[in-house]
Amino acid sequence: MLIIMGLNSPRQDIDRVKQKIISLNCMPHEIPGSSKLAIGITGPTHLFKEEDFQIMHSVQEVVRVTKKFKLVSRQMKSEDTIIDFGGHSIGGKELCIIAGPCSVENREQTFEIAGQLKEMGINFFRAGAYKPRSSPYTFQGLKEKGLEILSDVKSKLGLKIVTEVMNSQSLPGVCEVADIIQIGARNMQNYSLIEEIGAAQKPVLLKRGMSATVEDLLLSAEYIAAQNNYNIILCERGIRTFETATRNTLDLNAVPVIKQWSHLPVIVDPSHGVGIWDKVSPMALAAIACGADGLMIEVHHDPENALSDGAQSLTPKKFKELLNKINELAPIVNKELKFYETTNSL
Amino acid sequence: MLIIMGLNSPRQDIDRVKQKIISLNCMPHEIPGSSKLAIGITGPTHLFKEEDFQIMHSVQEVVRVTKKFKLVSRQMKSEDTIIDFGGHSIGGKELCIIAGPCSVENREQTFEIAGQLKEMGINFFRAGAYKPRSSPYTFQGLKEKGLEILSDVKSKLGLKIVTEVMNSQSLPGVCEVADIIQIGARNMQNYSLIEEIGAAQKPVLLKRGMSATVEDLLLSAEYIAAQNNYNIILCERGIRTFETATRNTLDLNAVPVIKQWSHLPVIVDPSHGVGIWDKVSPMALAAIACGADGLMIEVHHDPENALSDGAQSLTPKKFKELLNKINELAPIVNKELKFYETTNSL
Amino acid sequence: MLIIMGLNSPRQDIDRVKQKIISLNCMPHEIPGSSKLAIGITGPTHLFKEEDFQIMHSVQEVVRVTKKFKLVSRQMKSEDTIIDFGGHSIGGKELCIIAGPCSVENREQTFEIAGQLKEMGINFFRAGAYKPRSSPYTFQGLKEKGLEILSDVKSKLGLKIVTEVMNSQSLPGVCEVADIIQIGARNMQNYSLIEEIGAAQKPVLLKRGMSATVEDLLLSAEYIAAQNNYNIILCERGIRTFETATRNTLDLNAVPVIKQWSHLPVIVDPSHGVGIWDKVSPMALAAIACGADGLMIEVHHDPENALSDGAQSLTPKKFKELLNKINELAPIVNKELKFYETTNSL
Amino acid sequence: MLIIMGLNSPRQDIDRVKQKIISLNCMPHEIPGSSKLAIGITGPTHLFKEEDFQIMHSVQEVVRVTKKFKLVSRQMKSEDTIIDFGGHSIGGKELCIIAGPCSVENREQTFEIAGQLKEMGINFFRAGAYKPRSSPYTFQGLKEKGLEILSDVKSKLGLKIVTEVMNSQSLPGVCEVADIIQIGARNMQNYSLIEEIGAAQKPVLLKRGMSATVEDLLLSAEYIAAQNNYNIILCERGIRTFETATRNTLDLNAVPVIKQWSHLPVIVDPSHGVGIWDKVSPMALAAIACGADGLMIEVHHDPENALSDGAQSLTPKKFKELLNKINELAPIVNKELKFYETTNSL
């Protein structure tokens, strides 16, 4: 349920509404908006009488939220959520491009790739220090050593860091380095971890699980929002189907569905979504064309010798060609590749 | 296996190669190409010795085809197949847009929609006279009466007709009216029907089955090509997965995979692929962005009262807005909406 | 909708009810029952007033059928449908075991296997004369020649024949030989063919399509029942999922679901369901344990040299061991292997 | 890779083999067997020369393991793993039946159900104190309070406790109470948690993830075995497919596949596998019939008022009827319901 109040409602009116909610054993959540103040209510709201709130001071409207997810639903907040990163943002007109290797393999490899991406104007650098792998006998990431390298990339190149966390033990270390904390597909329903990450109050990139419906994904996002952390970026990365020609089946249908059901930004990871490097660029363009707020793409300067995901990584050269195409495509869907003009037009 | 010969090889050299193939209990297939003459071989080729052909006159090369599908594979023919429709073509630079209602409901409805599409410059009109429906108690199409109406649309408006055939009994009637014969998703593995349609030597639109892999789709196309009919248009229209938010899961990954594996044109049907009208346009743009050769889209002037598929049909107005977007997008992927400029720019 | 009348209602009362139904543009279907006479109604029944029928002579009850499928639903007929084959039946207490090779390969192979099965007491022999194959270059069956061999098996060994039909052209020939006409998984939604087969008034074995839900399967069965042919045997044979360890995913959940939703018998084909011979017997036992009315199993005396499906075929010896187990299991689920005692206990 | 040595090989021969393995940067794992001593090797074994080991004292054979999973593979250990629980065991001839409510709801409910199960002879009691739920607004379990109740059930009724752990914070508490630690389907690829649980050296019940292949499941088990913990029970509980008639699609094919690929015991959870109470018993019988080592079943004395999973819970009465059937079925597949005779035959 949702209480809509005027944006400049007196604090005492707001507090009275929130106290009433608490007195009914529910939780109030102030939800940021540009023209209205909304107070989301979670908990056993089925017993609420809407009239009890409608008569309160400054209350304009009382709305029932029909979806199972509440705080992240479009009903709760009709405007798009835009997450600000000081000069760059995710979820608005600006397309967000997150790029980098699957894993931090060593200092040279990481700086080599980060340096080339920086030159292209990329602001968000992805690379895994902790790698969830289906076999215990494959490369599991450099762990703390990897975080150190990412920390240096951040301080020396000024790139924002997107990196995955696998457990609570390493969460404090990841929080120190990461600008955006990634939750991998395999942990999308690891609710304990998601809650902890949500409580860390850092922006979160939540990847869709391999067999998660869009509703499941939004319910997992709801766990984060319930910690009063609305800085959530959803990521479509392919689901499991019977098709074996590609690593996963990229479900781009999910993009317009999510944009309708939720106010949160949604990006697409075509690298995992198709899993074959020469099909990554077409799928990246398709993602932008159907309304994604950005992309997450694996880039490696030497894919054949990559310790993980080499088969789906673009070389910096191919990635640059893709950026050129995205830059042409963006205005057709009312987006822009903000960094591009200044950096690449010369 | 594939024998590559010079384009101007003497007929007697070609015939000698074909006779040798037949003498080994296999079938030769001359495959059209612009710079080389290729002779595809199907049958028990595992016993062939490549040397036996390499020494023959005019033979330039002998190539093993490693895929299960042969004649439709990119290995057999490296150039894109372009199907000519007198002034318009499918598979080349020109984007093909097939539009119309799900079903022929009556004369007025059909002419109303066809007329509006004609005005927009659309050349290919789709509408079903025979409708395969999962329940025997829902509208099954106007059948022969529907074909008559389509025949009138063809003669009066000059539109090319794309319509589905469900069985051999109605094939002659459909062949008379249709410029492109559609094989529906439910009949993609109805090999008897596919072979008959292939033998009819008309262009065929083959829709992917709900649980067909890309390989399955190309093997079904192979049945048609084996009738020496190469005028095959493949159509991705969504597969069945666990996701229930949309009618099907549109597998756009299939587009670049098919373009790599086969020389045949591939189009996308976002109407069935997502199944919800307000998500059709984003998915149509995505299809073009990832390299599709065209689209098949359901358009109805009164979706709420459509006898079938109303929920996924665009109004002519929405469809026109989509065409505008496609026209902007096309050049970015080296395509063009050929009919558009003359008709719509005024 | 369903009109329940007394079993001995006067013919004129029954006819009056049927005439009223027809006058309302619907179709009446007399449905056999042991204690009541039911008249199923299909067509636009949403406008019917139940009172109009309740007041008619001999009418006891008027029931709305809530499922999309009507005639095949348990609501229409609460008793199990038992199909009689003169001495043997399918759908009752007796377990039905259909066995034989995937294909008729030649006279010797067919009689070799049929002879061994006959000795074990098997009554229903399966073997394909027409084979739908995903590739046009693999063995497509002996066709008419295969039917001739099956006809001889029938006359010489007295086995009942179960064989697949792929198109209407070959339907008359198949009807002459077959005691049960099989509709393969790939043709489960080939509604034209299904209707024709239904109209042939022979017992039909309808296999579930690879991506068909149980509801889809029952809707396809409804096409047959709508031809007033209720001799339909449903067959679960595995669906397509992401799992690649087995050929298909045998969905045994479907067995109790179908038994609840429909009065039709359901059997299971574990050969296609798992696709690996040494896992066929455990899955066959599982099928009986969860309530299936029988099994359809591929048996070949020389699996390594079978022209199709050798990998999933049991040898006669292994099949005999399975029969022993089934015979032990049957009474636990209130079934019996009727032929077994006399033939095999010595 | 695997080194097979005589069971009574001198300790110094064994140690020499292990030292050689370590010197090559790999890990040796002594694997318990009744007739041979096997030393599994994990790590970069591709450079090993088999001859180097074949010439060592007491070494009988060197075997390459071809599957991605090693320690849990049947190649590593041909005998079935039997886990002993003092009087009862899992993985041998004895069928293991784990029963209880989805969640610990309160003391009364838990003791009510546990008491009734105890009377039937059940030894393993399941009930969740920590509940992973897709929505943050549904019942999340009693947590520590739930563990206390389970601890009392254990001490007062002498039942062995099977309960889920969701994170490392609660692992020590769960370890104190649980005889078998359950890893839920949603955490099957939470490798950090799995490793920690493996290291706790308690028996583990590992449920298959909703989109996990059998290979994925065995690779997750490998993470546990790599901690030298071989007391792992695998659990099939249904996968996600397009079918919506049931909660999940129970993949019983997985049972014979796992029995062939791995030496670990496998049980089946038909409650989640089908999700509808009146179909749980048939699917339970099917699971035993195809070779499962046991069952995990939800039982609740008041399903309509259960706080979770009521729709799929059996009443104690229905569960008792199922036990009767299982007792009849067990000998047919060479199993026994050991507890049953003494307790239930009177």
Image (cartoon, coloured by chain):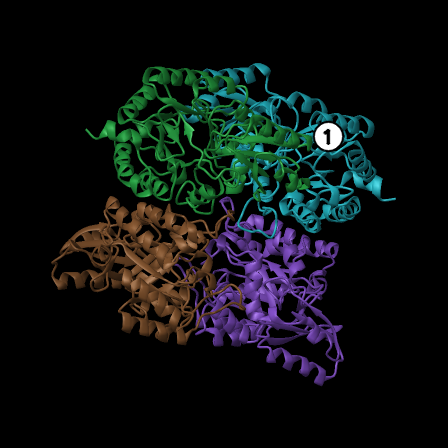
Chain colours: A brown, B green, C cyan, D purple
Of the pair D91 and C7, the residue shown nearer to us: D91
Q: Residues within 10 Å of mark 1 (few under 14, many from 20)?
A: many
Of the pair D272 and B284, the residue shown nearer to us: B284
Horizontally, residue A135 falls left or right of residue C325, namely left
The total number of labels drawn is 1
Horizontally, residue B175 falls left or right of residue D230, namely left
x, y percentage for residue D247?
A: 50, 49
Whether B242 is drawn above or below C195: the answer is below
Asked if residue C38 can be seen in this view, the reply is no
x, y percentage for residue A260?
A: 30, 47
Determine the residue positioned at 26% across, 47% down.
A328
Horizontally, residue D49 falls left or right of residue C346, namely left
Q: Mark 1 highlights which residue?
A: C161
Horizontally, residue D271 falls left or right of residue C107, namely left
Among the 4 quarters of the image, the one containing residue A189: bottom left
x, y percentage for residue C78?
A: 59, 34
* Residue at mark 1: chain: C
Asked if residue C187 can be seen in this view, the reply is yes
Determine the residue positioned at 21% across, 30% down.
B345
Of the pair C227 and B265, the residue shown nearer to us: B265
x, y percentage for residue D242?
A: 49, 45
Of the pair B235 and D101, the residue shown nearer to us: B235
SS label for mark 1: strand
| Quadrant holding the N terminus of chain D | bottom right
Most extreme residue toward the bottom, as rendered? D12
Query: Given the image, on which type of amino acid does mark 1 rest?
Result: Ile
